[in-house]
Image (cartoon, grey):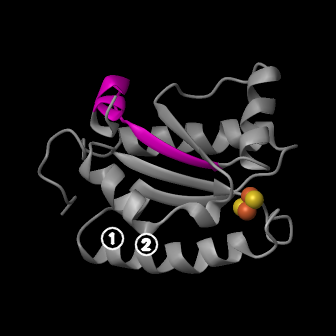
Amino acid sequence: MSKTTQITELNSNPNVVLFLCRWCSGKGADLAGTSRLHYPTNVLPIMVNCSSRIDPQHVVEAFLEGADGVLITGCHFGDCHYKTGNYKTFRRMALLSRLLKQVGVNPKRFRITWISATEGAKFAKITTEMVEDLKKLPPYGKNGKGGDS
Ligand code: FES
């Protein structure tokens, strides 16, 4: 199954690609599930070993393949299992965020946040907030036009 098929098969409005690091954010998502917290089904989770494995190109590809928003989550600073991975992610994605804004992508479409294994409620809150914010914007990925302005 191609990436395009996966994103379009979500068939939700909006579609959100969610990158999670396996150690903290992934466990936080698990906790949200086992705690029976409600969060949107609009997200396509992509698990990586560390948020530092996410290349800016992955984010750009997600938008090009039909995502209406991209959410990156990782361990809190000081908790990354690879010591400095999330610091690198933060710097890299801050640059990407500015670039996306310059090409007309609404900043609400791209977020990065830190979620620990004990923060299932935060996971549910962040994903819900992002989906609700994106519902207020016109579709991005599906209309194929790109750009919010
Ligand atoms: Fe979670 Fe690096 S292992 S951000």
Residue 148 percent location from the top left of the image: 22, 58
Whether residue 57 sits left or right of residue 52 in the image: it is left
Tag 1, which secondary structure?
A: helix
Which residue is nearer to you in this view: 147 or 22?
A: 22
In the rendered picture of this protein, how many numbered marks are placed on residues?
Answer: 2
Residue appearing at x 81%, y 21% in the figure: 34
Residue flagged by tag 1: what amino acid is it? Leu
Which residue is nearer to you in this view: 8 or 82?
A: 82
State the residue position of label 1.
Answer: 100
**Magenta range:** 5-20
Residue appearing at x 34%, y 77% in the figure: 99
Quadrant containing the C terminus is bottom left
Q: In which quadrant of the rendered view does residue 112 lie?
A: bottom right
Residue flagged by tag 2: what amino acid is it? Ser
**Per the image, is 106 magenta?**
no
Tag 2, which secondary structure?
A: helix
Whether residue 87 sits left or right of residue 6 in the image: it is right
Residue 18 percent location from the top left of the image: 52, 44
Whether residue 102 sits left or right of residue 39 in the image: it is left
State the residue position of label 2.
Answer: 97
Picture layout, residue 21 above or below residue 42: below
